[in-house]
Structure formats: C-alpha cells, structure tokens
Amino acid sequence: MTDKHTELFDLQIIMMQGDLNIRAVAAGNPDMTARAYFDMLTEMRLNAPEFIEDLDMLLSRESDRYTFKRLTDMITLLTNLGYDKDMINFDSLLDAYDRGHSRLTARYAKKILEDFDILLSRVSEASLTALPESIRLDPETVTLKEWISVSRKEETSDKPVIFAIDDSPVILRSVSSLLSSDYKVYMLANSTMLEKTLSQIKPDLFLLDYRMPDINGFELVPIIRRYSTHKDTPIIFLTSEGTVDNLSVAIKLGACDFIVKPFQPNILREKIARHINKKSA
C-alpha cells in the first residue's frame, strides 16, 4: 500500500505525550489524509536543523530578516501540526524581535529551543520503518481521523515500557537513544503533566530526575504510588547528588535504586534490566 519512500509515524506515542494536538487537527481538517499529516511531520524533521540553527543565532543575537522568515515558516508548520505548547513564547519572541529587544528575544528563543528539542526527539522516536500488521489502511487515502481511530486499536508492543522524567532535553535524548532498542521509552520534561500521562500509559519502570525546577523527584513518588497499578512499579532516581542521605530518602519513599549523573550507559541498562526482571519474576 505504501512505497519505501513513505515515512510513517506511530501517532499514539506523540499523542500520549501531549506534544501535538493531533485529534484537534483531524477534527478541524476532516478531509486531511494521514499521508498529508505524515508529510508535515517529515518536513518538520527535515527543517529542524535550520530551525535550531536560527534559534541559536537569536540566542547569540546574530540573526537577520532572512533568519526570522525561516523561523516564522516553521512556526506556521508547527501550528498546522497542532503544536500549541509554545505559541505564547513564539508570539512573545516575534514581538520582542520587532521591537528590537535582543536580550528578551534570546530568552524566548532559549525556551522554545529546549521544548522543540524534546518534541523532535519524540517525533523521531515515533518514526516507523513499516506499518504494523494490525493496520491495513492506505495513508494516501484514509483521513487522519480514521487513521487515529484504527491505530488506537493497534496491537501493543511487547517491549517493557520506561517512563523517563527529566527537565534536561540532553538527558532525555540520551536515555531514549540508549534504551529504545529494548524498551518503549516515554519522555516527559515537565513533571506537572505526570498524572495526566499516567492515566494513559502504564510503565514497567520509572526514571525520575531528583532535582527539577517545578517539583523534585522525591515529591513525585507519592503521586505515582497513589495509583493502584503502580504501588510496586520500580522507580530509579537519576541524580547528580549521589549521597548516602539522598539514597536513604529515596529508599524510604519507595524507590528501588538510583544512578548518579553523568551515568555510564552499561550501568543504566544493567540496573533497569535487573529491576524490570524482578518485577516480572
């Protein structure tokens, strides 16, 4: 049904994370095909390096009108994809730029860059090489709304699910890159979205950053344990403060282990495998 050049995406991964409001796009564009939406995702990925470079130029205050035109084109594309997370920051950036406030422009550019980095990682994670057997539709002709409806019934992956929460895009990218071959990795940069996300997915293990700006990892443990399905789910802390006191507090709260950052890839894999195997034993 699709040729080898057609890029496909697991939209459920993106929707679960709440990065793109794909259902709203489908509702507002009832004739849009799944292929048309996939094309926009592909265009976003292809233009991402230039977009990141342009934001970096704003950060260094070396931008020009051509740079700004490319930025506005990407903002339009992201809007069409249903990305509304940073629209206030985008509007503020445009306004600051027009008024010549370079320092304020750089501040908004930094925030947008951090959020876009995470979005790009998740869209890349959702990229498929082939359609699952359970989906027998042609994205060229099926509407986006129909595609969402059918893909929701897709057979679930037999990979264990890891839920990583960290405010650092670099850490989230590293975790996803190191683990995605053996696990299905969901990433969250803002811990305030935890409860909403847990209503949609059931991880086999949590990786929690200890120190985050909105709420620390220790405070997330009681929230996770409130769910009957996660009373015994392994929780591993990622922390740059690997002291005995921190470990003691983590264990008392119900965590099973911690890993000191910057972590060694083999240690990360070994500890995750050990605790997931214990859970399934």
Image (cartoon, grey):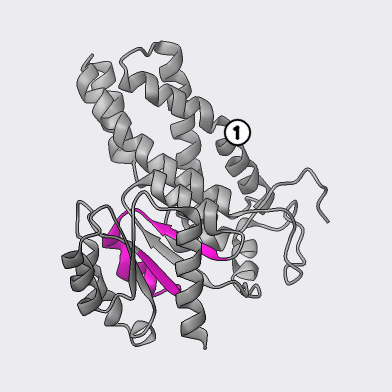
With respect to residue 207, does 71 lie above or below?
above
**Residue drawn 72% across the image and 66% down it:** 132
With respect to residue 214, does 73 lie above or below?
above
**Residue drawn 50% across the image and 36% down it:** 77
Please state the extent of the stretch shown in magenta in the rendering.
Answer: 183-207
Q: Give the amino acid type for the residue marked by disc 1 in the picture.
A: Leu
Residue 34 at least partly seen? yes
Is 187 within the magenta?
Answer: yes
With respect to residue 263, does 225 lie above or below?
below
Q: Position of residue 257 (x, y in %)?
A: 34, 71
Say left or right for 39 vs 251.
Answer: right
**Closer to the camera in the image, 32 or 8:** 8
Q: Quadrant of residue 192?
A: bottom left
Q: Position of residue 235 (x, y in %)?
A: 35, 72
**Closer to the camera in the image, 139 or 237:** 237
Is 73 within the magenta?
Answer: no
Q: Which residue is label 1 attached to?
A: 46
**Residue drawn 37% across the image and 35% down it:** 113
Say left or right for 214 vs 12.
Answer: left
Q: Position of residue 266 (x, y in %)?
A: 51, 58
Q: Quadrant of residue 183?
A: bottom right
